Image: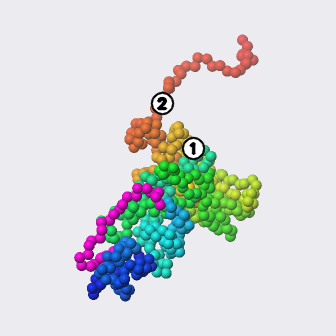
Amino acid sequence: MLDSPARVWERGGEVVISPPEPCRPFIDQIKARCRSARYSSLGWMVSRSDADTALDLLRTHFPMIQDSRLGALPAPIFADGVAGDLFARLDLLPLLTPLAPALHAISNDRHLARAHLAQLSDQAPEAPIALGFAEGLEGHWMVAYAAQRFWQELLSSIGQIIDGVVQTDGSLREQLTPETLRAFWLTTRERSCGKPPERTGQRWYPPQATLPIWTAALLACLDGPPFTMDPDRSTLTRTLPPWPLRVRADLHRLDLKDAAHWPVSVCVLPGRQSPDGNDALLHLSSVNGVSKNRALWAAVLDGRREQIPLRTGYQRHYPRRVDGRNQYVTDWNDEPLPTSGLSHLALTHRSAFEPELGQAFLHLAGNDAAGAPDLPLFAQQLSRAISVPFDLAWAAQLWAYGITPDDSETALITPLPSAGCQGYWVLADEPRWTRLIIAIQRGVAPETLRDDDLAVREVGATSAIDEVIEQAGEGGEDDVDDE
């Protein structure tokens, strides 16, 4: 593997170069550039005059080298480099976009990418090396374990740095700035790969100079329409179609009552957040035949609370319906869908439409990378769930405060396991929302407020009237007793 070191030592007046794995590009180049090169059971034997050339070739394909020769120079100081233009290698997008399924599978099945990476190396040989991939004999591709871990972290977290704003027509405008992308890449690198090494070859470590190639690979793996560059080359932007299907999601089969269903979108409340400790179904959208959709609808609302097998990403859930009467709002299409003639069932927890005072509620967003919320809808939901009035224009600040995790307390807004959409569970905890609202009103940080600042003071006269002088009624003169 790329994490194993390549060994170099002297034997009988020759230099032995032993790669950890056979690599076809290295084999072809050492044959062409080193006339004295010959292969043995120990590795490649070269003369001392060709040793420097062979070592440079070895360093190109294998980052970790252990040089045991007498008087060998120490490995060069690790050069992290600087990437001035993070979008300089967007020319790789036409090559990397067809590889998106293989690049996604590297975190689980590295062998799926063999044929695709071979095509990429023919047209852009620097790209696989920068991403931590190297080709061996018979199309066998090797991936550094550190690169695999680093790539998985990047793919799973890239959506957190994409800034999305829902437009008035329901569409979503997303943007990605180079400053945010650079900080995200550096932070993830330090968390996954540790601090930079002192010298090159001590261990696999991606230099910052390769950041444009990593940027192109990440953009190629994002679902939905591609990003476009602004004229000033400062921001990447794209517009996604209206909620709830901004991006096409892979359909996962749901087998229930000896019938196959294909959910379009699902949202589950994990058991750790559910009152009874069991996974609860909050949203389910399915397109199928009328009879199958009715069977699915009956299975969800069955009083026996049958478990429903669902998938959200790589996780499996078996949620039950929420306890109580009239907990769901069900929608059916009045007429068959125009193209397929099928029926569409949408089952959503009532709190998404009618939040109750002091009760947690569901906020549904579209299936985009960042899960951008519908802030006007969130403000309306929150205003019904808490008793403290606030300006609806503060929705963005309240959302930012609520979704920020706090080690001392549970986040007020928590992303839920979802597929085809993005659900959020909002805790309508009145004292904590009150602190946030007062902090935003005063323009200060919430942690700087004192308890006295949260006291409710009575305004206006509260003294009672001592005596009622006259009481008027609506009775007529007939009610008066004759004297």
Residue at the spot x=65%, y=55% of the render? 347
Quarter-of-image position of residue 134? bottom left
Crowding at dot 1, Cα within 10 Å, few <14 / some 14-19 / many 20+, comes out as some
Q: Amino acid at mark 2?
A: Glu
Q: How many marks?
A: 2
Q: How is the image coloured?
A: rainbow
Quarter-of-image position of residue 444? top left
Residue at the spot x=60%, y=61% of the render? 249
Whether residue 202 sits left or right of residue 159 in the image: it is left
Where's residue 85, x and y in %? 43, 56
Residue 180 painted magenta: no
Q: Amino acid at mark 1?
A: Pro
Residue at the spot x=39%, y=39% of the render? 450
Where's residue 221, x and y in %? 53, 63
Residue 202 visible? The answer is yes
Front in this rendered view, residue 221 or 360: 221
Crowding at dot 2, Cα within 10 Å, few <14 / some 14-19 / many 20+, comes out as few
Quarter-of-image position of residue 318? bottom right
Residue 78 painted magenta: yes
Where's residue 129, x and y in %? 43, 69
* Secondary element at tag 1: helix
Q: Which residues are magenta?
A: 65-89
Q: Quadrant of the N terminus?
A: bottom left
Residue occupied by mark 2: 458
Front in this rendered view, residue 440 or 73: 73
The numbered mark at residue 376 is: 1
The answer for how far apart the CA atoms under marks 1 and 2 are is 31 Å
